[in-house]
Amino acid sequence: MRIIAGKARRLPLKTAPGLDTRPTSDRIKETLFNILSPQLPGCRFLDLFAGSGQIGLEAASRGAKKAVFVENNRKAAACIQENIAFTKLADSCVLLQRDVVSAIRRMEGEEAFDLVFLDPPYGKGLEEEALKALAGSGLITKETLVILEARLDFPLALAGEWGYMVTREKTYKTNQHLFLQLK
């Protein structure tokens, strides 16, 4: 696992030991960032359920003005902090070690994010909690692009029930990215 492009290009990243996180493969990450590349320079990027922090760090390396990482797992948060220091991207990175919903509440009143990425553990219903909290927070606007990494059988109709419209889908062998915006 590494940073693919930008200021920290080719730097290897650590991941938390164990099976608590599912790092996104470099191939899927490259595809995602090819899609996002026009929006990255100068953006505010929110990485929810950040795991190792690789997605937010890739955004920061490619020119995001600010990348905020939210991770509740203590070992994963320590890993993110190490990766931020190692990549020398600390000036543009902030780590919040707490659950996603309380982090969203804590950030209310701050400037809205341009891009939000969330990759919650599958099968625990955390997508709903996070997306509903985001929709009611003021941290996203109708222009904000929210990317949900989900299992292949994720029911798309749920996004509509939670106040979002699916603007794009990108399917891979084992999962998919759903690109969402507020209705």
Image (tube, rainbow, N blue to C red):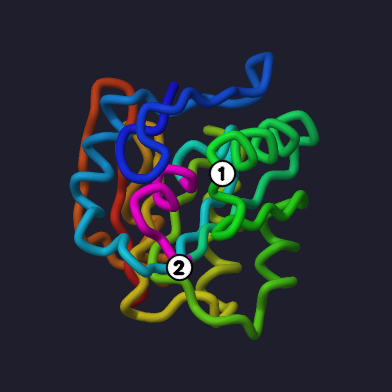
* Amino acid type, label 1: Lys
Front in this rendered view, residue 132 or 54: 54
Circle 1 — which element? loop
* Amino acid type, label 2: Arg
- Vertically, is 64 above or below 15? below
Q: Quadrant of the N terminus?
A: top left
Count up the numbered dots: 2
Q: Looking at this rendering, what residue extends furthest in the bottom direction? A: 109
Circle 2 — which element? strand
Instruction: Find residue 91 and report its horizontal and vertical position in percent.
Output: 59, 59
- Vertically, is 180 above or below 4? below
Magenta: main secondary structure equals helix
Question: Residue at image x 52%, y 26%?
Answer: 13
Callout 2 crowding tier (Cα within 10 Å): few <14, some 14–19, many ≥20: many
Question: Residue at image x 21%, y 47%?
Answer: 169
Front in this rendered view, residue 84 or 170: 84
Q: Quadrant of the C terminus?
A: bottom left
Question: Magenta stretch?
Answer: 56-65
Front in this rendered view, residue 96 or 88: 88
Instruction: Find residue 11 and report its horizontal and vertical position in percent.
Output: 44, 28
Question: Which residue in the protein does label 1 denote?
Answer: 88
Instruction: Find residue 93 and report its horizontal and vertical position in percent.
Output: 59, 55
- Vertically, is 133 above or below 142? above
The part of the image, by quadrant, that contains residue 34 is: top left
Closer to us: mark 1 or mark 2? 1
Which is more N-terminal, label 2 or label 1? 2
- Vertically, is 44 above or below 69? below
Question: Residue at image x 34%, y 80%?
Answer: 142
Q: Verify whether residue 62 appears in magenta.
A: yes
Instruction: Find residue 60 and report its horizontal and vertical position in percent.
Output: 44, 52
Question: Which residue in the protein does label 2 denote?
Answer: 44
Q: Verify whether residue 157 appears in magenta.
A: no
